[in-house]
Image: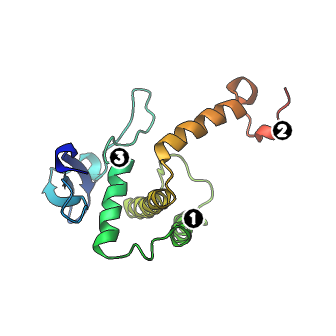
Amino acid sequence: MSNRHFRERKLQIPIDEGGPGSAEVASHPPSSTGGISFHVYKRHESALQNGHTERSNTDSSGRFTFSAEPTMEDIRRMQAEFTDERDWNKFHQPRNLLLAMVGEVGEVSELFQWKGEVAEGLPDWSEAEREQLAHELSDVLIYLLELAEKCRVDLPRAVLRKMALNKLKYPASKVHGSAKKYTEYKD
């Protein structure tokens, strides 16, 4: 990729290192080795309401939403650079990435183990438990994106195709309020 086609991006990422704040991540054009350079600058902000370090992301209906940035592609690039800088590509092959991801899913499972049903939004969880969950889910996502990269699966496009197939398999008029598998529905 030539530098003239590269779009510099700055992302604001909330952090909780030494108190409330955020990190500014600036991506710069590829270096001579072809990698994207991401520099992190910590910037403290005033404490957020109720001492929470996370911002509430909700849409007009009150449903949780993800931040617009970083994108899947941003995360893929950051992980590719991280792996390249450490010469880990020889270890980060599809089978190993899959097994690492499964291990991380196990770590997510441990956080939920013995808690019974957990309410949406995790109202009974401590900030430390929420932060640990965020770390483990991030590990799962990072490995998933790297696995997709190594397998040459364009996840955003694959998701669009899969959602279209799911709409055909599970038409709302037939499945509304039911958890049956698509093979159990009769025409």
Q: Position of residue 31 (x, y in %)?
A: 18, 61
First-in-chain label (2 vs 1) = 1
Q: Is residue 61 above or below residue 83?
A: above
Q: State the residue at coordinates (46%, 63%).
A: 143
Q: Circle 2 is placed at which residue position? A: 184
Q: Circle 1 is placed at which residue position? A: 109
First-in-chain label (2 vs 3) = 3
**Numbered disc 1: secondary structure:** helix
Mark 3 crowdedness (10 Å alpha carbons): few <14, some 14-19, many ≥20 = few
Depth order, front residue of 187/55: 187
Q: State the residue at coordinates (69%, 30%).
A: 168
First-in-chain label (1 vs 3) = 3
Image-based side of 10 in relation to 76, left or right: left
Q: Circle 3 is placed at which residue position? A: 71
Does the rendering let one see residue 125?
A: no
Q: CA distance from mark 2 to mark 3?
A: 37 Å
Image quarter of the C terminus: top right
Quadrant of residue 33 within the rendered picture: bottom left
Q: Nearer the viewer, mark 2 or mark 3?
A: 3
Q: Position of residue 15 (x, y in %)?
A: 26, 58
**Numbered disc 2: secondary structure:** helix
Q: CA distance from mark 2 to mark 1?
A: 29 Å
Depth order, front residue of 70/131: 70
Mark 1 crowdedness (10 Å alpha carbons): few <14, some 14-19, many ≥20 = few
Q: Position of residue 77 (x, y in %)?
A: 32, 57
Q: Which mark is residue 92?
A: none
